[in-house]
Amino acid sequence: MTLADDTLAPPAEKPAALRLLAMLRRDKVACLAAAFLVLVILCALFGPMLLGEAATKQNLRGRNAPPFSLEQGWLMVLGADQLGRSLLARIVVAAQNTMLVAAGAVFFSALIGTVLGLFAGYGGKKTGEAIARLADVIMSFPSLLLAVIVLYVFNPSVANLIVVLAITRIPVYLRTTRAEILEVRERMFVQAAKVMGASHRRIMFRHILPMVLPTLLTIATLDFAFVMLAESSLSFLGIGIQPPEITWGLMVAQGRPYLNNAWWLAFWPGLAIILTTMSLNLLSSWMRIALDPVQRWRLEGGAKNNG
Amino acid sequence: MLRFARKRMLASLVSLVGLVILVFFLVRLTGDPTDLYLPIDATDAMREQFRANNGLNDPLIVQFGRYVWDLLHLDFGDSIRRARPAIDVVLEAFVWTLQLAVITMSLVAVLAVVLGSLCAFWAGRLFDRAVTFVSLIGASAPDFWIAIVAIVLFSIHLGWLPTSGTGGWQFWILPVSVLFIRPFGLIVQVVRGSMIGALSSPYVKTARAKGVKNRPIIFVHTLRNAMLPVVTVMGDQAAALLNGAVVVETIFGFPGVGKLMIDAILQRDFNVILAAIMVTAFAIFLMNLLIDLAYLLLDPRIRA
Amino acid sequence: MKGMSLVLAALLASTAGAFAQANTDVTIVLGEELDLVEPCMATRSNIGRVILENISETLTELDMKNGGQVAGRLAESWEDQGNGTWRFKLRPNVKFSDGTAFDAEDVKHSLERATSPDISCESSRYFGDTKLSASVVDPTTVDIKAEPAQPILPLLMSVLTIVPAETPIEFTRQPVGTGPYVLSSWTPGQSIVLDRRADYWGAAPAVTKATYVFRSDSAVRAAMVQAGEADLAPSISVLDATNPATDFSYPNSETMYLRIDTSVPPMNDKRVRQALNMAIDRAAFIGSLLPEGTEPAVAIVPPTTLGWNPDIKVPEFDPEGAKKLLEEAKADGVPVDTPIELIGRTDNYPNATEVNEALQAMLQDAGFTVNLRMLEVAEQEKLYSKPYLEGRPPQLLSVLHDNAKGDPVFSAFFKYHSDGRQSGISDPKVDDLITRATAATGEERAKLWSELFATVHDEVVADVLLFHMVGFARVAERISFQPTIATNSQLQLSEIGFKN
């Protein structure tokens, strides 16, 4: 996400960022992915402000207007939905809620899961055991039931949705972190750090976390898609975000019955989900290499190393 | 290892009890089945009668006490909707879910590990890019989309496979394929990432520097080290399948536990919800135990 | 992406891959599974569709082909004995599928069983607070007494399924009936099979065996008929009804309306309620979000119901007029700017969310402030029925009401009487009309119901009546079947024929 800021920042002040940017420019695919994500973020930030009106303007006579026609104006280039609203405008506006839910849920589940996993793997045996059993309980608590309970007792708001989705995704981070630590903590350098008297916290966060991070990052980027789709199926079952709020997931769910006669209703928001996930994943795997001093040569060397 | 397993079983039992208590009280927050079970124009006397018949008038703690007492006698209560023992309803459905989950996860495990490792080996090459591209689309495409399009294509247009339902092996192809796509996409990426990390770790480099030219040996050793996170993520995906594949069950008319659970939740059929959670939780606990045992096998240094 | 467009192309191309089965077995695909096969629960549509008049028969039935008359089934004739008692003459020589003979004792037991407090039978809800008791006169004659007197008792008998006198008072899983079919296998979650009986009292139907399967997704149900895996899908979404050769629309007896709680300002002002009615462009929905054939409604029951009033006019679509009425009300101090909650139910019917979004937009165009909330069934139910929550904001409940029984008595009290469980009004004149109509018979009854509908619609403006809905059935080309208003609640296999 910092890439967006970097492009605006004065170049002279951040030589490291500049170097990263130069590397990015060399990798076309990663560059494209970054550009798409910047676009999504801009949509999320300014979409509702600019196109909020157009996204809710109904026109029953122009319902399900097919895409790729400019007769109704450029807003209808992706077609119109079942109420004759501009799909383009709706996708742009929905980016905000979608990103909020997805980023929120992934961030909180990854954060809580990783921290718990660190304690489970590195902490005492009792703590570890207790935390692992907690993960068992969460894993076997059906997310749907949790959603019904939270959304019934409270309200189907963006914040509550984040809570529901975050809780259900905690175990995978928790268990992954724990599993990796169980292995890593036996390695030489950790033992060495222990012998040298490093504090537990230091070992945990300075030595172990960096080893676990790459896997967590892979899972987190893929979880982005998972969360967007999970949110979609919740809407589909009538317990997710409810209209007039919109998310891509809701648009996909609402467009599904039209698959036969107006495929574009579900296709474009679905494509938005796929492209976002793909960009995130490509960028994250690029970043893993770019930030790893051992492998950085692969990107800096340019074309001659690409074989 | 046996002692470890026994201790784990005990701990899991405690978690199961906690889960039951949690769910018992939480589901009752979501409302009363009376309004859903009886038609809207039922009289107040009928409502009262229904509540009394189903013990819904007693204080929660009394209801809970009765439930636990029955549970100790292996009585999971009756389904309000179906007027038969909840555990029968759940077990019938769980058999289907279990079969779906086992078949799907076996396919995922084999294919994802092989393809993911090859991707890592040839990182950045065409093969890697192609597999990554396809698996990412798989991981992020809505499954109901894929399911409906598959039915239209393979059942109506080509006429190769039945649209839905249960029966011979042909009936399993579409549901399993649709279920396969998402965990496969996810796990391929995890295998790939984990393998890239392992391949660039010092011991592999040392081995290579020492002149170990035998690729299979390097491959197998690296894989073993890279498997820990893979097994964990597989466990997570398998747990999701054991909780029921709602969309696939709904569309293909598979009588699994996911559809059962949704209906039970929407109808507030508490005994079915509880029985279903206990059965799936038991399966998931068992699976996590196996996974932790797998850690031990993969890396003997771990004292889980 | 190329692969995707190929698939989509395949999707758009419609091909009929149906292959004919040469025999007289049929497969019927339903959207909702049966949780029970209990005859006394047959008034629930998911159960009734399979067992009503196929396995279990009733004394009388509604004959939808002849304008909704009450016709005899297991009863040959009936007459009012006065003081609330009706005498039914039963059809002789009828046998249950277990071989026992049908007689008056079975009717008596069936009634006692259905009204027993020990099992929650649903058919008894149609009897409401009326106490029914049966006494056997002779094996083919039974007296049924209602307290208080019940002028439509023969109609009520169309919901009472007859079981043998030996049936225990608990839910059965092996229903025994007098119908032309017998339940031969039930695999919960998968299928139910009915086989034709050899010793049925009436004419033998053409269908020899019916297999019911369940798919909750409408697109899959439609696909199954198209692929030849099923012969009949009695209910598919309008969006899947794409083939005029196999897809037929029928009125499904559901009426869509917005329930207004008139005790909450600004809804207590009649002008505001009129403005709500004028703000909605009913015509714009038909043929767009709702299928062709949908009718604008002026009563909460379908036009085939007794006392239907043809003189009531659908409110004109007039947003300007609505705005004017709102301004007048505002000038009188009515808080017309209070945000109103429009409360819909997800998946209540195809396009439910979109319809409610469109309603919201229309109301807002006419000057209302409307917030839309889409709820799950249990949550909406809580707001729909009394006791209403204290301190509630003004609410419009967007709901469907189903009455295929031909008489408004099954709707009027609940929807419009001051004590009605889902009533939003409290009006002495309406209460009085309902009480009188319920007790009346013949012409008088029809007249009073007509008057009630006019009063509720034009004088009280109790709600926003919207549409009589239609459903779609997909019928394979090899069979002939004509869906009717009754198809929603029962599906008689004897009505299915075979072409060639």
Image: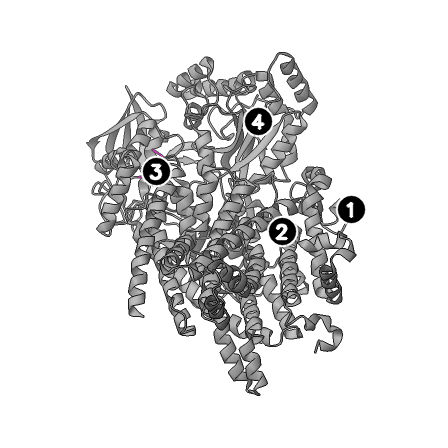
Mark 3 or 2, which is nearer the eye?
2
**Label ID, residue A266:** 2
Residue at mark 1:
A74
Residue ranking furthest to the top: C332
Amino acid at pointer 2 = Ala
Return the residue nearer the eye: B152 or C49.
B152
Which quadrant holds residue C272? top right
Q: CA distance from mark 3 to mark 2?
A: 50 Å
Residue at mark 4:
C340
Q: Is residue C158 magenta?
A: yes
Question: Which badge, 4 or 3, comes first in the chain's sequence?
Answer: 3
Q: Main secondary structure of the magenta part?
A: loop
Q: Which span is picked out in magenta?
A: C157-161
Mark 1 residue element? helix
Return the residue nearer the eye: C432 or C271.
C271
Residue at mark 3:
C73
